Image (cartoon, grey):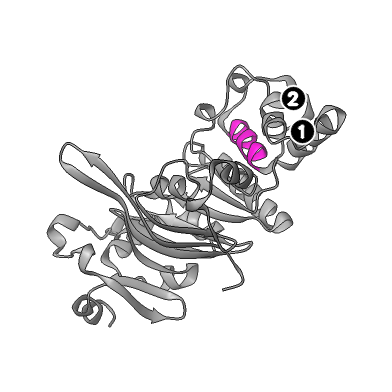
Amino acid sequence: MADNILEVRGLKKYFNTPHGLLHAVDDLSFNIEKGKTLGVVGESGCGKSTLGRGILRLIDSTEGEVLFEGKDVLKYSKAEMRAMRKSMQIIFQDPYESINPRMSVGELIAEPLIVNKICKGAEMDKKVRELMDTVGLAERMINSYPHELDGGRRQRIGIARALSVSPKFIVCDEPVSALDVSIQAQVVNLMKDIQQETGTAYLFIAHDLSMVKYISDRIGVLHLGHLLETGTTDEIFENPIHPYTKSLLSAIPTPNPIVEKTRSAESYDYATSGIDYTLGTEHHIGGTHYVKCTDEEFAKWNV
């Protein structure tokens, strides 16, 4: 579709281990529309971060295509990819590990501008202050260092760095999971505001389904490298089909203490479920809602 900024086709990433090949990402296909957010959820170790890094070519993929504005970035030369970095950025989970602790806030935000030769001198200083204002960092912090700031402000530096090159697409790799709940809300609201202003598309990676529900237009449920279920936020929350999706949704706590005391979460164990992800194919539920399963499983679940 013409509105898709990103199309992933059959993406795979396998790692060699002493026990054989680890299928971290196994034949994933999906689209992200311009100015929209796809939330990818799943437990730790399911392949979410590997997927994000594979799309950006921070790691080499085993197989597949990543079409950004219709062109496969996996076939780009180093020079082409370097230019593409302006359009595709990432916000990391731990801001303290992704920034240089010896650089001040101003220097950290200016670094991408210098590396990409976007501006310099007085123009760069003005741009840095504008970015600080955009992400809610007080101008007085321009000479502060990361260790002097809390986690929320450090993450705002990471967001400002990503925004500095005016990207069209950002991989948000669990950008709020290391932050306090109150700070999480501030950062996610900031990201929503930025998206409305700039039209930037997000791949929002998280294990917190309630957070994904708040920010995402569409959701993809990932487990053991397989994309098990996709749909709009409403489709996934109102009519979950796959047992793994149901287990994730049932784990979300409710604000009613009476209900919470009597509520029981659904358990899911792939090893004993009798489900083989490698045998599943995409089945249409309705609208834009799809689930990966066998014909027999589909007949059993979709009732």
Which residue is at the far right? 122
Q: Secondary structure at mark 1?
A: helix
How many dots with numbers? 2
Locate residue 242, reporting x and y percent.
29, 68
Disc 2: CA contacts within 10 A as few (<14), some (14-19) or many (>=20): some
Magenta range is: 152-162
Amino acid type, mark 1: Val
Q: Residue at x 40, y 44 (%)?
A: 60
**Quarter holding residue 267:** bottom left
Three-letter code for the amino acid on which mark 2 is drawn: Ile
Q: Is residue 60 left or right of residue 56?
A: left
- Secondary structure at badge 2 equals helix
Q: Which mark is residue 182?
A: none
Q: Any magenta on residue 156?
A: yes
The magenta stretch spans residue 252: no
Which disc is residue 142 wearing? Answer: 2
Pick whichever, 233 or 200, lies toward us.
Answer: 200
Pointer 1 residue = 128
